[in-house]
Image (cartoon, rainbow, N blue to C red):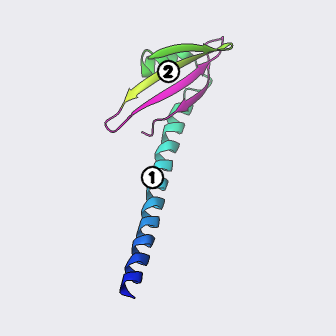
C-alpha cells in the first residue's frame, strides 16, 4: 500500500514539474516574440543597428532572409527575419527564449 502511495506521489510531482517548466518556457517565448515584434514593419537598417550584421543572408522568392545566430550559455539559437524588396521587416522566426 505504501509503495503505491509513493508511486502516486512521484507521478503527481512529475506532472506538476512538467507543467511548471512548460509555463516558464512559454513565458520566455512570449517575451522573445514581444521583443522581436518591435522590428516588424520597420527598416532592416534598424534591425542591423540593433542586432548587428546578420550571420547569414539568403533569399526566398522576392524576400531576403537575415539569419542571426545567437550563442547562448546553454544552447545556441537562431533568429530569422524576412525582409521585403523595400527593406522592411515583414516577419520573423526564433528558436531563442531569452
Which stretch is magenta? 72-98
The question of residue 24 being in magenta is answered with: no
Q: Quadrant of residue 65?
A: top right
Q: Secondary structure at mark 2?
A: strand
The outermost residue toward the right is: 62
* Measured Cα–Cα span from mark 2 to mark 1: 26 Å
Residue 6's x, y, as percent?
A: 37, 79
Q: What residue is pinned by disc 1?
A: 24
Q: Quadrant of residue 75?
A: top left
Give the residue at x 43% y 22%. Answer: 51
Give the residue at x 36% y 86%. Answer: 2
Of 22 and 33, nearer the camera is 22
Q: Badge 2: how crowded within 10 Å, few (<14), some, or many (20+)?
A: many
Q: What residue is pinned by disc 2?
A: 67
In the rendered image, the vertical position of residue 60 relative to residue 14, given as above or below: above
In the rendered image, the vertical position of residue 40 relative to residue 62, given as above or below: below
Amino acid at each position: 500500500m505504501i509503495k503505491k502511495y509513493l508511486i502516486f506521489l512521484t507521478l503527481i510531482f512529475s506532472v506538476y514539474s512538467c507543467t511548471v517548466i512548460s509555463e516558464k518556457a512559454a513565458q520566455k517565448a512570449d517575451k522573445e516574440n514581444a521583443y522581436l515584434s518591435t522590428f516588424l514593419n520597420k527598416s532592416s537598417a534598424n534591425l542591423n543597428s540593433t542586432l548587428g550584421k546578420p550571420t547569414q543572408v539568403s533569399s526566398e522568392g522576392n524576400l531576403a532572409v537575415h539569419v542571426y545566430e545567437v550563442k547562448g550559455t546553454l544552447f545556441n539559437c537562431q533568429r530569422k527575419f524576412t525582409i521585403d524588396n523595400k527593406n522592411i521587416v515583414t516577419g520573423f522566426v526564433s528558436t531563442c527564449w531569452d
